[in-house]
Image (cartoon, rainbow, N blue to C red):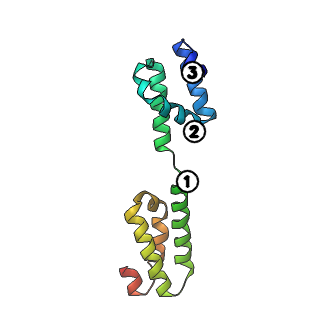
Amino acid sequence: RALASEQDASARRNAFLMLCLCGQERAVAYLFSNAERVTEWPDLLQMAAVDLIRKVCRSPNRADKGRRAAANTYCQLLSSQSDNNVRLILLDRLNELRTAHRDVMVDVVMDVLRALSSPNLDVKRK
């Protein structure tokens, strides 16, 4: 409400930045509801909106955290399991994760390489 009624560009920008810091979801909702009027906003407020979009796009979401946890768990199981069939299944799962979400696998590459030091040729090939 303060953003809509305020006339001073600096005050509007400061209010928007405060909203971004205290309630990012509300700031995004405000931005969505006023998307058609963003071009009419003062330059300072437009830059704050661009910064919010950049932050939202770069922040890891919950799904990424879950994928990273899954990759770590797969690697822990890969190093702890002695059954080669289980290792092959885990390597399949890690490969699926790699093809769909390559950035998640960056953190666990060394763990996978450690597991590939297995004497079994099937595990090494996989």
Q: Amino acid at mark 1?
A: Arg
Under tag 2, what secondary structure?
Answer: helix
Q: Nearer the viewer, residue 77 or 70?
A: 70
Q: Earlier in the sequence, mark 3 or mark 2?
A: 3
Q: Nearer the viewer, residue 14 or 106?
A: 14
Q: Nearer the viewer, mark 1 or mark 2?
A: 2
Kindly check if marks 3 and 2 are in contact, taking CB atoms under 8 A apart as contact.
no
Q: Is residue 39 above or below residue 53?
A: above
Q: Which mark is residue 115?
A: none
Under tag 1, what secondary structure?
Answer: helix
Q: Quadrant of the C terminus?
A: bottom left
Kindly check if marks 3 and 1 are in contact, taking CB atoms under 8 A apart as contact.
no
Where in the figure is residue 108, as x and y percent of width and height?
A: 49, 64
| Residue linked to disc 2 | 25
Q: Amino acid at mark 2?
A: Glu
The quarter holding residue 72 reads bottom right
The quarter holding residue 101 reads bottom left
Question: Can you name the residue that lies furthest to the top here?
Answer: 8
Left or right, residue 39 beside residue 4: left
Q: Which mark is residue 62?
A: 1
| Residue linked to disc 3 | 3
